[in-house]
Each structure stands twice: as structure tokens, then as C-alpha cells.
Image (cartoon, grey):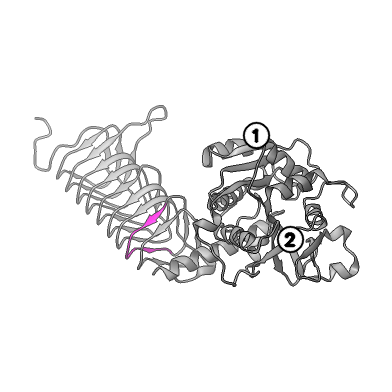
Amino acid sequence: MTASDDVTTNGEAGGGVAAVVVLAAGAGTRMKSSRSKVLHEVAGRSMLSWAVDAAEQVEPEHLVVVVGHQREQVEEHLREVAPAVITAVQDQQNGTGHAVMCGLAPLGEVTGTVIVTYGDVPLLSGETLVAMVGEHRRAGHAVTVLTARVPDPTGYGRIVRGDDGGIARIVEHKDASEAERAIDEINSGIYVFDADILHDGLASLGTDNAQGELYLTDVIGHANSVGRRVGAYVTDDLWQTEGVNNRLQLARMGAEMNRRIGEKWMLAGVTIIDPATTWIEDSVDIAPDVTLMPGTHLHGATSIATGAVIGPDTSLKDVEVGEEATITRSQGLLATVGARCQVGPYAYLRPGTELAADVRIGPFVETKRAVIGRGASIAHQGYVGDVEIGARTRLSAGTIVANDDGETRHSTTIGADAFVGANSVLVAPVSVADGAHVAAGSIVTEDVAPQGSDPRS
């Protein structure tokens, strides 16, 4: 069976899955990292979170993640992203068969369908798992294996077919003969099992192999030996079978995921001028008719409203951008940019920045915890922190709102329709009244009265 054939992929095919076991206990030494391999990110999310999301789409009764190496990190992460997941511990990594035994141990007696997958295969989709379950049941398989045909199968387990077209056995690369190594159909390591065959097959495993480990693949031989059929679900999307073992593979996987995310948004009406240099995380939301210029990076909970133009060379994380706003060669973090705002180039919107509609933030301006009213403008080379600025107020070039005296941060309020001349410093805490003018080069340490009023009154 291939992914291009007509199979049922609706909820009925995926429903009734007793358990999904996600294997995530390996040491991942080739990553050369103090962080667990499965916690490294692809498109802004851990590889493990992608695996858990895919597993959840088959609506299993139990979802188990097998942890081992750096288990404390993995368990803490799962509590944040998937608190309902069950964790099972594999203290000693003694092969994939042993890992599945550990994963099933907390569940007791399991009947029905069991899926086994991995925590380092981030492009595996829930749709593929649902389709596998549908094919498994339609064909009456005891085991269904996700396979693919690849141009270079080096390192992968090979699929050895029987005379009836079913899978006779899976041979690991280190145990394969020359003839078997020439086979280009490979085992992804992702399976759908009937629970009874899985239990009996695990009980029959031995360590008579090159690695001296309990191979899950040997359950295939057990199923055939008792006359049960083993079939394949062949995917033509090779990326869904690829795991990540080192930083090179992580980068390749990230680039492919980014390509797919960009393609999704372009088909939804977003213009991406240069997809190769535009990076968009999975959690970002973009409206139609947005234009992303080269070198744009969008992270976290960033949302971009229709008609906005972002970039070039702009990085936004957790930033809300309003309709028809323009952000050029700038950086933003935990900020809000209103409709029709113009930001940059080379501006830095730090956390707590809130720009109302029609605000202009010029070149080399930095804002932090700054609430800026409609139509206000801050010219180039300025810093404003811990400040509230009224509508239509203008801060000229070189204006600094100094919010920190070295010990304590203070706030400044600048009213509506005010004007602050070039190279002025407002030393908080001060208040500038509506309509007030501050002359160029001023150092303001006291409140400023409205224009035309008597400051002595």
C-alpha cells in the first residue's frame, strides 16, 4: 500500500487506538549537547512536541513517551507542552524492543491497536499515522510498517519482501548481507501493531545480533512465524521517515520544515519575496496580502495583519502587527504595532512597547515599556523607556527618556500634541503636559507645563 493510494484517513480509521508509544530515551550523543536531543527545535518547537502532536491525531486511549537519557529535562518539557502524556522510564538503552517493553509496562493489559513512533522524527504527520491505521485495519495486517524507497539506504534497516509481497523480515544495516544492502526500501521504525502480536513478539526477542540488543524489528519475524500478515504503508514523502541524530540533520530538517511552512502561507495569499531567506515558525499567524521581504524571521506568537510589509532583514518574536504597518530592518520582542505604523530601519522594539495606529518610529530608535499614542512620532537615534506618550506628540532626533537612575526605574508621561526638541534628555520621573514644548538640547528634571502657561504658577 502506498500513500498515494485511496485509503480511509478519517477519524474512524484513526479511532480506537489503544496506545501510541513514542520512543525518546536515546542518548543522542552525536548532537554533542547538554540538552536532550528530542528537545532541540525545528520551526520553533521541540522535535518531541511535533511527535506528540502527530500521535494525538489518532486519538489514542494512552499516549506514552519513553524517557531515559536526560529524562528530567524531557519530563519537565512534557509537563509544559503535553501534561496528559504518560512517561515510562528506560534506565538502560537495550534496543528498541526493550524500549517498547518499558513503554507498555505502565499500561497493564492492552488490547487493540498500538502505534510505535519516535521523538526525533518531526516531519511525521498525524495524517500519515491515521492513514497507516486505516490501511492496517482494511488489509487485516498484524503489523504495518511505514516504509520508503530512498536513493541511499545506508544505515537504514532494509525491507525484505516475501513471495506474496508482504514483509518477510527487516534486516538492520549492520546485519545485512551484500544483497540485502542493495535493497532500497527502508524501515522508518514506525509501526502499527495488533497488541497481541506485539506482546507475544516482544516476549520472544533475543539478543543474537550485531548490536547485542532487543530489536523491535524481530517482532516481524515472530508475526510471520505464526502465520500473521505483515504489510507496508509506503510513503513517497521521504522526510516523514527521517530522524535527527546530529546538528547537520537538524539544520536540514529545519530548512525543509520552513520550506513547507512558507509554501502553506504563500498558498494562503502571503507574498514571500525570497522563501530561502525567510524563516517562519509554526506558531506564527499571517493574514492574506502580507508581504515578507528577504531576511525576515518570524517567531513565537507573532501575528501579522493584512496589508503589512515586513522586512527586509527584520526579526519579530511575539509581536502583534496591525494592518498596513511597515517594519523595515528592525527587531521586535513582545511588542504591539498598530495599523499603518512605520518602524525602522534599525529600530528595536523591546518588551512592553505598544504602538497605537499611525505611529512613526525612526531609524536607530529603541523603545521599552513604552505606550505611544496614535499619530505620535519618534525621530532617529532615540531611546524611550518606561514612558507613556500621547497622541500626535513628536520627539525629535536624539531624544532620550532616561528611566533608570542606577538604582530604580522611574516612569515618564508626555501628553498629547507635545513637542520635544532634538538632543533632549527627560530624566524620569517627569511629566510633560499636553501641548508643551521642550527646547532642543534641554535636560528636563522637572515637570513641564503646557505651552504658554506661567511655570511659576
Span of residues in magenta: 302-311
> Residue 293 at x, y = what percent?
44, 67
Relative side of 369 to 31, left or right: left
- Identified at 38% across, 55% down, the residue is 303
Could you say which disc has been placed on residue 72 in the image?
1
Mark 2, other Cα within 10 Å: few <14 / some 14–19 / many ≥20: many
Residue receiving disc 2: 230
Q: Nearer the viewer, mark 1 or mark 2?
A: 2
What residue sits 54% from the left and 66% below the top?
A: 259
Quarter where residue 273 is shown: bottom left
| Magenta-drawn stretch contains 305 | yes
- Quick check: is 278 in the magenta stretch? no
Q: Residue at x 47, y 66 (%)?
A: 264
Q: Looking at this view, is 306 or 456 the one in front?
A: 306
Counting labels gives 2
Question: Would you call the spot at circle 1 few (<14 residues within 10 Å), some (14-19), or many (20 or more)?
Answer: few
Q: Nearer the viewer, residue 304 or 294?
A: 304
Classify residue 432 as left or right of residue 147.
left
Say which element carries label 1: helix
Q: Is residue 324 visible?
A: yes
Question: Is residue 160 depicted above or below 93 in this figure?
Answer: below
Quadrant of the rendering where the N terminus is positioned? bottom right
Q: Residue furthest top?
A: 407
Mark 2 secondary-structure assignment: strand
Q: Quadrant of the C terminus?
A: top left
| Badge number at residue 327 | none
Q: Could one spot residue 271 in this view of the protein?
A: no
